[in-house]
Amino acid sequence: MSMPPTPSMPASPPARSGRPDPYDRTRSSRGSESAFGPRLHSALQARGPLCVGIDPHPGLLGQWGLSDDADGLDRFATAVVTALAGEVAVLKPQSAFFERHGAAGIGVLERTIAGARAAGALVILDAKRGDLGSTVQGYADAYLRPGAPLAADALTVNAYLGFGSLRPFLDAAAGSGAGVFVVTLTSNPEGAEVQRAVTSSGRTVAGTLLAAVADHNASDPATGRRALGSVGAVVGATLDHAGEDLDCGGPLLVPGLGTQGGTAADVRRLFPGLLDRVVPSVSRSVLAAGPSAAALRAAALHQRDELLSALAAG
Amino acid sequence: MSMPPTPSMPASPPARSGRPDPYDRTRSSRGSESAFGPRLHSALQARGPLCVGIDPHPGLLGQWGLSDDADGLDRFATAVVTALAGEVAVLKPQSAFFERHGAAGIGVLERTIAGARAAGALVILDAKRGDLGSTVQGYADAYLRPGAPLAADALTVNAYLGFGSLRPFLDAAAGSGAGVFVVTLTSNPEGAEVQRAVTSSGRTVAGTLLAAVADHNASDPATGRRALGSVGAVVGATLDHAGEDLDCGGPLLVPGLGTQGGTAADVRRLFPGLLDRVVPSVSRSVLAAGPSAAALRAAALHQRDELLSALAAG
């Protein structure tokens, strides 16, 4: 795989809209610069509203002319980090595609996370972990503890065992300046079976989780009322409708843009009044441009600028 | 850590009750010896109804006098496999406690799974994975594909994204003779928020998932109507009541026994008529007996015999 020389890229993205910045940390009496919410907000302001997924599935490795093994995975991830970690606000490795290759794949994941963070990107590890008690503490140790081999800036988590089961994630995040994204509403039709089921409180499961996230953020002394919370939600971009109050006080990670069908218009439609806390995530429509670093950057910056226009106009 | 010599152990566990064996593979016209359900049934018959969790959390490593790093993890897991993989039907490594140690920990997990299977135990990897589409396929490749570095006999999975999202797991399992355990009802009080929510069909989320598992097993040509299905459910042992039809046609993995509060009496109470498909899982009450191999074996066989009596009497 040949990598063309790095082209000259703009040092900073275009400024976002001129509206007052509701999450300006200088306005928060209790905001902590090291908390995830404010860090994410700053990154989105500085680099524009884009998360690029690192999803090295076998088809994509093949498209890039790489072998479906840990070596191919390493080349793929290194190319993405080299091309994008200095440019985009957030990179989101998908753990499954590293786990496919066993310990060698996890070694690549360690280097991918560390390399991306060292180059200035925030890393949300998409692993959707969830369990109970000491096991959740184990996952929190693995991904949210500073100095851990796989320490990321944030982790996606699964609340099938109840929002309360996530407590060790929330505590670890609060203690280390990390973030947590709770999967709430996904775009696949079969997701509604669980996510739209009605709890004893009369709300849906997704609505209950979103409200719990909001309560958590409202009570988090590290962010306070005016700063972006450090616990967010994952909400699919291709939902017909949200049907829930998405104002959870934290960021909204929105996968499914690009090849998966979601558009900037969907983001505007689904998140009115919340566009400044949306983290739109694209994967294949950027990754398919590789392995050329210039082409990866061009694809990412094109997506970013399109989202920047669409979200700023909201 | 010193390991005492292996004591002489009974070559085979006591026979279970004299009732006709409803899952005898010779009675199934379409049963496949390589399908997980029949393999699990044979293992439970031959070795008794016990799964031991391999949960090397930091507190337990400390109790064993081991360091909280990949070397301590390796010593712990090796000791458990050496002591128990030739004796108990099922071993269940908890992935979180290996992930804590990054790639080195996953290397230990590879050796743990392979070593346990080579010694004759079935391995259910407790990882509770769940996602969508190609990502679920990635997890299926990682854990259910023969020859993968982390290939196990079965995997626990999470259906927050709907039973339909699990399709790649089910297909992979059917193709490779592996098993899948869908988390349905957990013992923690906060689990009810999601698991007891009511879907549009009027059933609970857990009931909907259990019915979907039953439908899947009923239509699986590899197991057929008379063999134990290869897709099971995870149901906590310390539930006040199940409140659902647990007859899903597959095995019921029941964690929470022993130190976590569940007893053989709970198993009898919660699973009437289904005791021959229950896989009771203990962790700390066995693991706390280590690092002595003899003590680990004695603790495991004590648990097994207690369960054998309780379940056979049902």
Image: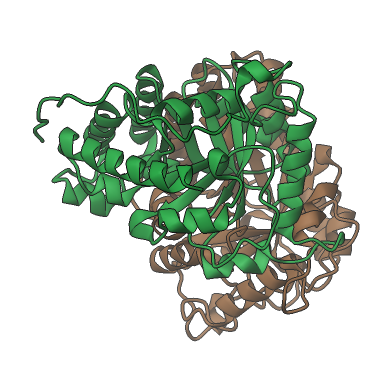
Chain colours: A brown, B green
Image position of A267 with respect to B307: above or below? below
Image position of B167 with respect to A277: above or below? above
- At horizontal 18% and vertical 50% (from top left) the residue drawn is B62
Q: Quadrant of residue B207?
A: bottom right
Give coordinates of residue B246: x percent, y percent.
66, 50
| Front one among B67 and B279 | B279
Give coordinates of residue B128: x percent, y percent.
55, 45
- At horizontal 80% and vertical 30% (from top left) the residue drawn is B219
Q: Is residue B303 left or right of residue B138?
A: left
Q: Is residue A282 left or right of residue A39?
A: right
Image position of A294 with respect to B54: above or below? above
Give coordinates of residue A68: x percent, y percent.
59, 16
Q: Quadrant of residue A176?
A: bottom left
- At horizontal 64% and vertical 37% (from top left) the residue drawn is B250
Q: Is residue A84 visible?
A: no
Q: Residue furthest front?
A: B18
Q: Is residue B31 visible?
A: yes
| Front one among A215 and B93 | B93
Give coordinates of residue A296: x percent, y percent.
69, 32
| Front one among A234 and B28 | B28
Image position of A108 with respect to A137: above or below? above
- At horizontal 17% and vertical 43% (from top left) the residue drawn is B66
